[in-house]
Image: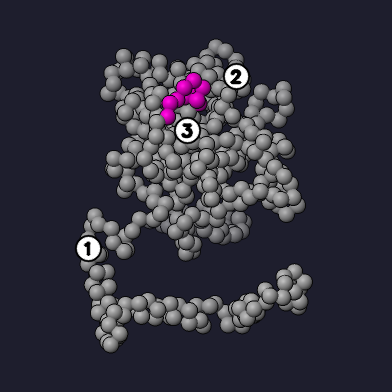
Amino acid sequence: MTLCRMEMIFPPGFFTVMVHLVMHLATEAKIGGPVCYRSMWFTERYLGRLKSNVRNKAHPEGSIAEAYLADECMTFCSRYIVGFETEHNLPSRNEDSEELVGRSDVPRRSTLFPHAGNPVGNPGNYVLRGLEKVQAHRYVLFNCSDVNSYLRAHADEMTHRRNLNVDTIERTQNEKFHEWFRAHIKKLEKENGINGIKNDIRWLSRGPVNAARRYRAFNSRGFRFRPKRLDKKTQNSGVMVTAKTSRYATAGNANPVLRDVTYYGRVIDIVELNYSGQFSVVLFKCEWIDVFSEEGIQKDKYGYTLVNFSHLMHKGDKIEHEPFIFPDQADQVFYVEDEHNPGWSVVMKQPRPRDVYDIGIERAVDTETEPFHVSHLGEMFKRKNNNQYWVRTDVEGTLVDANIASSKEEGQNHEGCGEEVET
């Protein structure tokens, strides 16, 4: 039946012996089970490797034995060699481990931020100006857990003897917090000295210098990202980020609701901010699809996500826009053009990065502090006692009849009193 249907689509010359054998693979899998338990492909591949070691055709067995022995000796020695690349410790193509941080071409990272990955290639010059510099520096501040206390102090200072809604606080912090933070740290330095503040916090408050660097690629969490301008035959610029975003129920509602929103976009530039030569922070500058409009994102009848890059948001022309993200916040996606809907692309998410395999063991995920958001100020303005429940949930409970338990307890109390009287 399958062949008959395929004959209606493909020409007769397509049906060779190999095509006919493919028809039986599904049936063989159902009858024989996994291929690794019944196939000779792996054995034949290994025999081919042994045969490639033959140099003297008069004595093939001796050539194979000598090559096998040499390979075993080199494997044994490589286990004790440190600092050299061997067959068993070759770095991955998308290597992003912290072991490379000490190299001269890898930027020095701050203790305020976790390791995000490693750049690829030699950097180029990049100049930060105007709104772009403010937006990049503000994103670094708002996503640093050590700055959250200063954000709350700034909000407390704004609301002192004034009744401001959350919308006004959010807008004011987007525009002026970086200036207040710099002045506030300088004030603390004069009052308490420089030793009372973390060195990285001091330099973070100064902001980045105008002279930055840009990279052609960046490896993070097993993925390799490239700017959109370098997408030729391959596509490495697609990103997806799930972030907590404040949304308003109505136009007149000034209290935002915090919820998870998935953003889709493409990397435009990979920028490294230089904080006065003390440390560096790498950011992705992206163009983002307008995910709050049906003209920017849709779902088709099959459940696939469609995006339209002609409708963008956070373009960077306003101070409240956020075109930047950290590399370790991005998941890589691919955009496939939809032939039936011109201008639309289908989002295809990569299941897992290169050289990462599912072996049934879940890796422990480092829990990071969530970025500060003005909706968290409700806890500061309305202090309530948290209800505490002293009930264990890790063991199965036992049902006890309260009447029987109370009667037994009373009987034990009477016996105890009688013993005391007799003594």
- Residue 236 in picture, x, y percent from top left: 52, 47
Dot 2: within a 10 Å radius of its alpha carbon, few (fewer than 14), some, or many (20 or more) residues? some
- Residue 398 in picture, x, y percent from top left: 56, 60
Residue occupied by mark 3: 143
In whole angstroms, how far apart are the C-alphas of marks 1 and 3?
42 Å
Residue extent of the magenta highlight = 126-135
Q: Which color mode does the image show? A: one colour
Report the residue at 65% width, 26% height from top: 255
Kindly identify the amino acid type of the residue bearing the numbered disc 2: Thr
Residues at marks 2 and 3 touching, judged by CB atoms closer than 8 Å: no
- Residue 167 in picture, x, y percent from top left: 61, 22
Q: Nearer the viewer, residue 354 or 9?
A: 9
Sequence-first disc among 1 and 2: 1
Q: Which quarter shows the N terminus?
A: bottom right
Kindly identify the amino acid type of the residue bearing the numbered disc 1: Tyr
Q: Nearer the viewer, residue 9 or 73?
A: 9
Secondary structure mostly taken by the magenta-highlighted segment of the chain: helix
Q: Is residue 217 above or below residue 27?
A: above
Q: Is residue 407 found left or right of 10 in the rendered image?
A: left
Q: Is residue 108 found left or right of 239 in the rendered image?
A: left
Report the residue at 54% width, 50% height from top: 233
Residue occupied by mark 2: 168
Question: In the image, which is nearer the foreground, mark 2 or mark 3?
Answer: 3
Return the residue found at the far front: 13
Asked which secondary structure carries label 1, the reply is: loop
Q: Any magenta on residue 134?
A: yes
Q: Nearer the viewer, residue 18 or 133?
A: 18
Report the residue at 37% width, 33% height from top: 280
The answer to whether one can see residue 142 in this image is no
